[in-house]
Amino acid sequence: MVQKTSELADVLEGVFLHAPVLDRTGLYGRYDFNLKWDVHDRSTQISAITDELNQIGLALVPTNMPVEMLVVEKAK
């Protein structure tokens, strides 16, 4: 799959980890990478994703830094 690292962060955040994931790589452009893990085995999913990312030189780093959010209560 060829995509931006920011797109990878969005997929990890929204689909797999259900937690904020920020792209702090500083990488621009599109990259070709292939990540594999068992999407049905939730018990090992985070460690499998972490292992796959480590193999391509990326890492998930837990932090308690603030994340900016926009909350919209009502839109017309």
Image (cartoon, grey):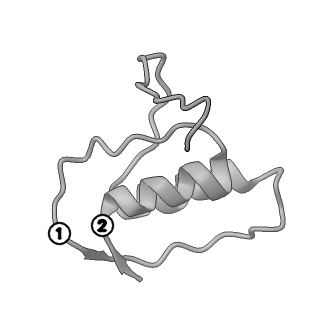
For image coordinates 40% across by 25% down, the residue present is 68
Task: Point out the tag, 2 or 1, that comes first from the N-terminus.
Answer: 2
22 sits left or right of 62 in the view: left
| Closest to the observer, 23 or 76 | 76
Q: Secondary structure at mark 1?
A: loop
- Three-letter residue code for mark 2: Lys
Q: Secondary structure at mark 2?
A: loop
Give the number of the disc on residue 4. Answer: 2
Q: Nearer the viewer, residue 47 or 74?
A: 74
**In which quadrant of the rendered view does residue 31 lie?**
bottom left
Pinpoint residue 10: horizontal percent, then vertical percent.
47, 55
Instruction: Residue at 59%, 57% (x, y): give it.
Output: 49
Residue hosting label 1? 29
Q: Which mark is residue 52?
A: none
**Gap in Å between the C-alphas at discs 2 and 1?**
6 Å
Q: Quadrant of the N terminus?
A: bottom left
Check contact, mark 2 vs mark 1: CB within 8 A. Answer: yes
Q: Residues within 10 Å of mark 1 (few under 14, many from 20)?
A: few
Which quadrant of the rendered structure holds the C terminus? top right
Q: Position of residue 24 (x, y in %)?
A: 28, 41
Three-letter amino acid code of the residue under disc 1: Gly
From the viewer's perspective, tell me whether residue 40 is left or right of residue 12: right
What residue do we see at 83% from left, 50% from top?
43
**Horizontal and vertical percent for residue 74?**
61, 34
70 left or right of 42? left
Residue closest to the eye, 61 or 19: 19
